[in-house]
Image (cartoon, helix red, strand yellow):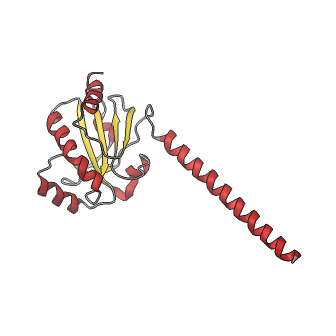
Amino acid sequence: MHSARIGRKRVSTVLSFLSISALVLSLYSCQSRQTEVSAGSKAPDLEIWDTVTGQKVNIEQYRGKVLFVNFWATWCPPCREEVPSIEALHRELFGDARFALVTILYKDTPKSAYDYMNANGYTFPVYGDHDGTTSNRYKVTGVPETYLVDKKGILRKKVIGALDWSAADARTFINTLLIE
């Protein structure tokens, strides 16, 4: 009976230690995610490729422009909700030298995106993310996630989840960045 109590105590101690360790690791992981890619920090580099031309793209190509970076997937229902407003934003600001729109496939294939874009008449640019390098740099936790970067390369807003980019507050924020 005495050894059974000691055995239960040891199991209880080990389980408590494992729970506390998991909690500390979880808190550390969340903290590093927020501090590495948060408003006011330098936007991480892009290591993406154009799904049409195959050309590599990096963030320096967009220096001096407001950069809209959106991670999405064709299999994602909230992404599909958000895409029409991204297309509207793209059509409105296409050709504006102060703005660039980059959408990056997250755990999806260029063929799926190409088929989806063609079926719906979407024209915004779609980029691939080799081995998830860029999504890891941006600490993407799921899709859709959008990052707005100012002309100096500073992350100004991070949006987790779908947003109507046609909404007045979203357009006002983008317009503010454009005139800065």
Number of residue marks:
0
Q: State which quarter of the image contains the C terminus.
A: top left
Q: Residue furthest top?
A: 180
Q: Residue furthest front?
A: 1
Say which residue appears at 31% left-offset and 46% top-offset: 162
Q: Residue furthest right?
A: 2
Q: Height in image: 101 above or below 119? A: above
Residue sitting nearer the eye, 116 or 82: 82
Q: Is residue 121 left or right of residue 22?
A: left
Q: Residue 84: percent from the left, percent from the top? A: 19, 46
Residue sitting nearer the eye, 86 or 162: 162
Residue sitting nearer the eye, 12 or 156: 12
Asked which quadrant contains residue 17, the reply is bottom right
Say which residue appears at 15% left-offset and 36% top-offset: 94
Say which residue appears at 76% left-offset and 63% top-offset: 13
Q: Residue 30: percent from the left, percent from the top? A: 53, 47
Q: Residue furthest bottom?
A: 1
Asked which quadrant contains residue 165, the reply is top left
Q: Is residue 149 left or right of residue 36?
A: left
Q: Residue 39: percent from the left, percent from the top? A: 43, 34
Q: State which quarter of the image contains the N terminus.
A: bottom right
Q: Residue 95: percent from the left, percent from the top? A: 15, 34
Say which residue appears at 29% left-offset and 36% top-offset: 67
